[in-house]
Amino acid sequence: MVRQLKNKKVLVTGGAGFIGSNLCEKLLTQNNQVVCLDNFATGKRTNVEPFLSDKAFKLIEGDIRNMDDCIQAIKGVDVVLHQAALGSVPRSIADPITSNEVNVSGFMNILIAARDNDVKRIVYAASSSTYGDSTNLPKVEDVIGKPLSPYAITKYVNELYADVFAKLYDMQIIGLRYFNVFGRRQDPDGAYAAVIPKFVKALMSKESPLINGDGNYSRDFTYIDNVVQANELAAVVESSEAINTVYNVAYGERTTLNELVAYLQEYLSEYDNDISKVEIKYGPEREGDIPHSLASVDKANRLLAYQPQYDIKKGLKEAIGWYWENLK
């Protein structure tokens, strides 16, 4: 049986975002008090509206770049699940300053607020982008390359600060290197939307999705419920060997973009057969993209008892069902 985070007061930064709101939802079903801190730069109010009537849920509209907001949110909590960040490699290339302010300075504020309020356990969203130009497959936690984007640099700096704070201030800090997370509530709109919701929306509209490159780049796509499981396990693990380190959070299989689109057309065609006939378009490769990504989840399995339940196909079927109901 998977260990769960129960009967605690938990701060979820970025709690109105895709991953954060799914964490809030799960935690509220397990008798936790949940504090959500979000500035709605990328999070959506609709993601947390169902929770507002729950007395165990508190929404603070604030910014992790503002120390006062961090202190207000963190007072009295037992655990921090830090999801707030500006994602997207292209966004960081277009605006590296803001990405650094949010992802590095904001992370520092959370660490200091936790330290000063005696909050020991922090689980934070790290990133597979940290592997940079390393060509090793599968990716293992202790072998990384040079970062390929400002975003990747910010997430690596998070890991460095987490390591130092844990040693200097006797804190328990665990990083989760997410690999291409997808699922319900992931935003399909905007210039920096993730590939799966963007492709799903295009196909539902009978528009041709655009693949960057020849479609042979591959990713370890990870369904949201696997990520929620990993956060809970990291929040409650007690073994000293399992704390103050980083873990890959993925399924452990890779899928090419061509295979991904084929799955999407197959599963969406169950709702509308014409989607199977939509033509796929190809464009130039994106700057800062790594060609292939595949995670070893052996460390998380061994130290956290992480056992992802959703492979790409099972996750896509769940996600498409949600999108069909919510994007029509």
Image (cartoon, grey):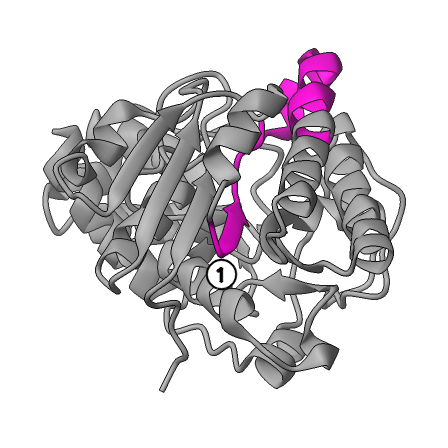
- Residue 139 is drawn in which quadrant? bottom right
Instruction: Please indicate, yes or no, whether residue 268 appears anywhere in the rendered image.
Output: no
- Residue shown at the point (63%, 51%) measured from the top left: 118
Q: Position of residue 272 (x, y in %)?
A: 10, 41
**Image position of 121 (left or right of 184):** right
- Residue shown at the point (76%, 50%) measured from the top left: 162
Q: Position of residue 12 (x, y in %)?
A: 44, 43
Q: Position of residue 121 (x, y in %)?
A: 60, 59
Residue placed most toward the observer, 17 or 180: 17
Q: How many discs mark residues in the rendered view? A: 1
Q: Position of residue 34 (x, y in %)?
A: 34, 47
**Image position of 248 (left or right of 43):** right
- Establish if 39 lies above or below 145: above
**Image position of 76 (left or right of 300):** left
Residue placed most toward the observer, 292 or 233: 233
Does the magenta-highlighted stretch encompass residue 96?
Answer: yes
Q: Name the residue carrying label 1.
A: 231
Instruction: Please indicate, yes or no, whether residue 60 appears anywhere in the rendered image.
Output: yes
Residue placed most toward the observer, 295 or 289: 295
- Residue 114 is drawn in which quadrant? top right
Q: Which portion, as a residue range, is magenta? A: 77-104
Q: Amino acid at mark 1?
A: Asn
- Establish if 165 lies above or below 71: below
- Residue shown at the point (32%, 25%) measured from the top left: 44
- Residue shown at the point (63%, 85%) measured from the top left: 302
- Establish if 296 lies above or below 38: below
Image quadrant containing the C terminus: top left
**Image position of 165 (left or right of 187):** right
- Residue 8 is drawn in which quadrant? bottom left
